Image: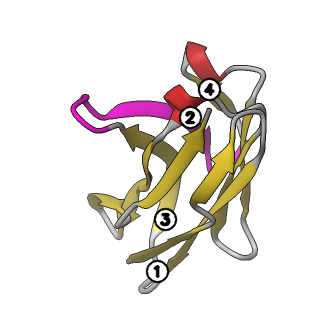
Amino acid sequence: VQLMESGGGLVQAGGSLKLSCAASGPTFAITNMDWYRQAQGKQRELVATITYGGGLTNYTHSVKGRFTISRDKVKNTMYLQMNSLKPEDTAVYYCNVRGYYFDRYLEVRGQGTLVTVSS
């Protein structure tokens, strides 16, 4: 399974960006999709997660009401709509996919896309 992220870039505080993560490759029964981020000098942080089947979502407190995670099951693609961005949202954002390849549990992470929010 390969993950292709896109949508990162430079934006002013208060602006918006939409990240995408497309999954491709062998048949993979996805159960959950996540967005993580890692700011320079800080630990990796789980930002948002969504169940692939039911679309149930969960967010870290700092992004609630500003970020929206979604997925398109036909395109096998996950999105993160980020609004009202703040300088503290600056980080490398990684998509992460969890599921099963036949009976083997797999977790795959993308290469990351840099989001920079200027003040």
Q: Are marks 3 and 1 in contact (CB under 8 Å)?
A: yes
Is 41 part of what is drawn in magenta? Answer: yes
Residue 65, horizontal then vertical, whole percent: 78, 21
Mark 1: give few (<14), some (14-19) or many (20+) Cα within 10 Å: few
Q: Say which amino acid is labelled 3.
A: Ala
Please report whichever mark, 4 or 3, sits nearer to the chain's N-terminal start: 3
Residue 101, horizontal then vertical, whole percent: 35, 69
Could you tell me which residue is drawn at 49 percent across and 65 percent down? 29
Distance between the alpha carbons at the discs numbered 1 and 4: 26 Å
Q: Quadrant of the N terminus?
A: bottom left
Residue 67, horizontal then vertical, whole percent: 71, 34
Q: Are marks 2 and 3 in contact (CB under 8 Å)?
A: no
Instruction: Indicate the secondary structure of the residue bearing disc 2.
Output: strand
Mark 3: give few (<14), some (14-19) or many (20+) Cα within 10 Å: some
Q: Are marks 2 and 4 in contact (CB under 8 Å)?
A: yes
Mark 2: give few (<14), some (14-19) or many (20+) Cα within 10 Å: many
Q: Which residue is mark 2?
A: 48
Q: Which residue is mark 3?
A: 29
Q: Say which amino acid is labelled 4.
A: Asn
Instruction: From the image, state whether disc 1 or disc 2 is nearer to you.
Output: 2
Q: Which residue is mark 4?
A: 58
Distance between the alpha carbons at the discs numbered 1 and 2: 24 Å
Segment tinted magenta in the rendering: 40-54
Q: Are marks 4 and 3 in contact (CB under 8 Å)?
A: no
Q: Say which amino acid is labelled 1.
A: Thr
Mark 4: give few (<14), some (14-19) or many (20+) Cα within 10 Å: some
Q: Which mark is residue 27?
A: 1
Distance between the alpha carbons at the discs numbered 2 and 4: 6 Å
Distance between the alpha carbons at the discs numbered 2 and 3: 20 Å
Please report whichever mark, 1 or 2, sits nearer to the chain's N-terminal start: 1
Could you tell me which residue is drawn at 50 percent across and 45 percent down? 35
Q: Quadrant of the C terminus?
A: top right
